Amino acid sequence: MLIHGVLALSLSLSGLTGATAGVDCAKVKCLALTFDDGPSAYTAKLLDTLKREKVKATFFLMGQHVEQYPKLARRQLAEGHAIGNHTWDHPHLPAMTDQQILDEIRTTQDAIAKATGQQPKLFRPPYGDTDQRVLDLVGQEGLPQILWTGTTLDWKLRDPKKITAAVLRLARRDGVILMHDVVPQTVKAMPGIIKDLKKRGFHLVTVPALLRGKPVPPGTTYPPAP
C-alpha cells in the first residue's frame, strides 16, 4: 500500500512539474511541442498519439473548456504532460481592466484545480497579446508567462502537410512550438510530425523539462525575448 501511495504521489508531481523522466536537455537536443485552447473533442486522439510515441507535451488550457472536458484535463496531468492557464475564454488581455484580467486567470486556475486537483504553474496569454501591465498581474498571481519560439499558424493552414512543414521549419534545440489541439488537422498530422522530429534527433519534452529543473520566476517571460 505504501509503495502504491508513493508511486501515485510521484506520478502526480511528474505531471504537475512537467518532468520528463530520463531526459537531460543539457545533454541532448530537446524541443517542446505546446498546444493551446483545449481540451477539445480532438484532445483524446492527440493524447493517444503522445502516449503511443512516449513523448510529452505542454497544454495551455482554457477554463471554459476544462469545465466541459474535465476528464481530459485530468488525463493530461496523469500522463505526465505539463498544463498551463490560457484564460477562461481567450480575450485580448491588454484591452481589459486589471480586475477583468485577474478574473480570467483566477477562474481558470480554479477550474483546472477542480478538474485535476492541481493548480497550473504556467500561464500563456491568448494570441501572445501581452504588455508589462498584464505581465505584472500574471506575476501577482504567482505565474510566469510562457510564449514560444515559433508558431505554426495551424489554425490558419488547416492542412496536415502544411502544418508538418511548419513544425519542421521551426524546430530547433530548446525551441517552443505553438500549435492547437482544437485543430483536427494538427492532431491528424502529429504521428508524422513526431516521427520526423525523432529522425532529426529531437527529444520531445515539456516546457519545464527545457528549463533543466529551474522554474521561471513569476512575472517573467520564457522564452526570453531575443
Image (cartoon, helix red, strand yellow):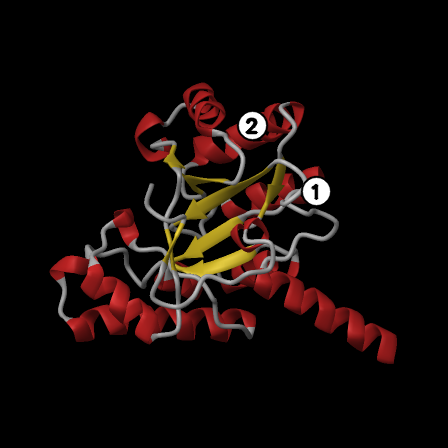
Q: Measured along the vertical axis of the image, is residue 103 above or below residue 208?
A: below
Amino acid type of the residue that numbered disc 2 sits on in the rendered structure: Ile
State the SS at label 2. helix
Q: Quadrant of residue 106?
A: bottom left
* Residue at screen point 55% across, 55% down: 208
State the SS at label 1. loop
Q: Measured along the vertical axis of the image, is residue 140 above or below residue 123?
A: below
* Residue at screen point 57% across, 42% down: 45
Q: Quadrant of residue 95?
A: bottom left
* Residue at screen point 45% across, 30% down: 185
* Residue at screen point 30% across, 55% down: 125
Q: Quadrant of residue 28?
A: top right
Given residues 65 and 93, the one toward you in this image is 93
From mark 2 to mark 1, how far is it between C-alphas? 14 Å
How busy is the neighbourhood of tag 1: few (under 14 within 10 Å), some, or many (20 plus)? Answer: few
> Where does label 1 land, which residue?
54
Q: Earlier in the sequence, mark 2 or mark 1?
A: 1
Given residues 191 and 194, the one toward you in this image is 194
Q: Is residue 139 visible?
A: yes
> Where does label 2 land, which residue?
193
Q: Measured along the vertical axis of the image, is residue 77 above or below residue 33?
A: below
Q: Is residue 104 visible?
A: no
Q: Are marks 2 and 1 in contact (CB under 8 Å)?
A: no
Image coordinates for residue 157, horizontal then vertical, percent: 34, 26
Image coordinates for residue 175, horizontal then vertical, percent: 48, 38
